[in-house]
Amino acid sequence: MEVKLGFGQTPKPQYVFVSREPDHCWYMLAEDERRIPIYEKALTGLITGIEANKRVETKFGIVEKTDLYILADKPYIIRSGSESYFSKNLLLSLDVITSEQLRNPLTIAVSPGNNNVVFCNIYDPVTYRSIGVSCDGHNEINWQALGQTVSLKINENHNLNQEQIQICTNKIPVNSTHV
């Protein structure tokens, strides 16, 4: 990611909210809390973390959300309701993704369902293959336990990647004429 010098935006993650609307499935909030629709159906980046069943205070009270952290052109946090089809599709997909796949960019795509339903699909952006999972037949899953399992897997993978980056930067040769 390139760092821009000079004046600019505050360097903080951009929240993206999942919501089934007539012409889009996710949006951002402007500083005045106005919804800004996102018409693109996919976000590609490196998954850097997830918080499942996170208790969040909203104008509707305390609710449980799933926050997926993605590093793309800038850091994003995709937020969805923990009980939503989107979150359940997301957790099922992330559960079957390998650690090797998590080291590479993935594409998170939204697709509208009936009423207020939004589905999540994860794709390999190089092969265009979907990590095909479905919520059908998963009624007996302990979603909280699955969220914890996926969180551990992603966070351990991200920590391993950070350690490898640190090791690489420590091995950069120093030009002895400048020391």
Image (cartoon, rainbow, N blue to C red):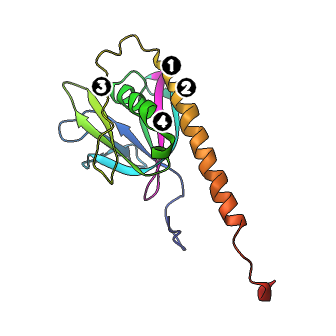
> What residue lies at 78% left-to-right and 86% top-to-bottom?
178
Work out how far the residue at label 3 is from the one at label 4, CA to CA, in angstroms: 20 Å
Work out how far the residue at label 2 is from the one at label 3, CA to CA, in angstroms: 19 Å
Rendered location of residue 52, percent (x, y): 50, 28
Q: Which residue is mark 1?
A: 144
Q: Residues within 10 Å of mark 3 (few under 14, many from 20)?
A: some
Q: Which residues are magenta?
A: 61-76
Tag 1 and tag 4, C-beta contact below 8 Å: no
> What residue lies at 43% left-to-right and 37% top-to-bottom?
97
Mark 4 is on which residue type? Asp
- Res 97 label: none
Labels 2, 3: front one: 3
> What residue lies at 26% left-to-right and 46% top-to-bottom?
41
Labels 1, 4: front one: 1
> Could you tell which of marks 1 and 3 lies nearer the N-terminus?
3
Q: Nearer the viewer, residue 158 or 113?
A: 158
**Identity of the residue furthest to the right in this view:** 179
Work out how far the residue at label 2 is from the one at label 1, CA to CA, in angstroms: 6 Å
- Res 148 label: 2
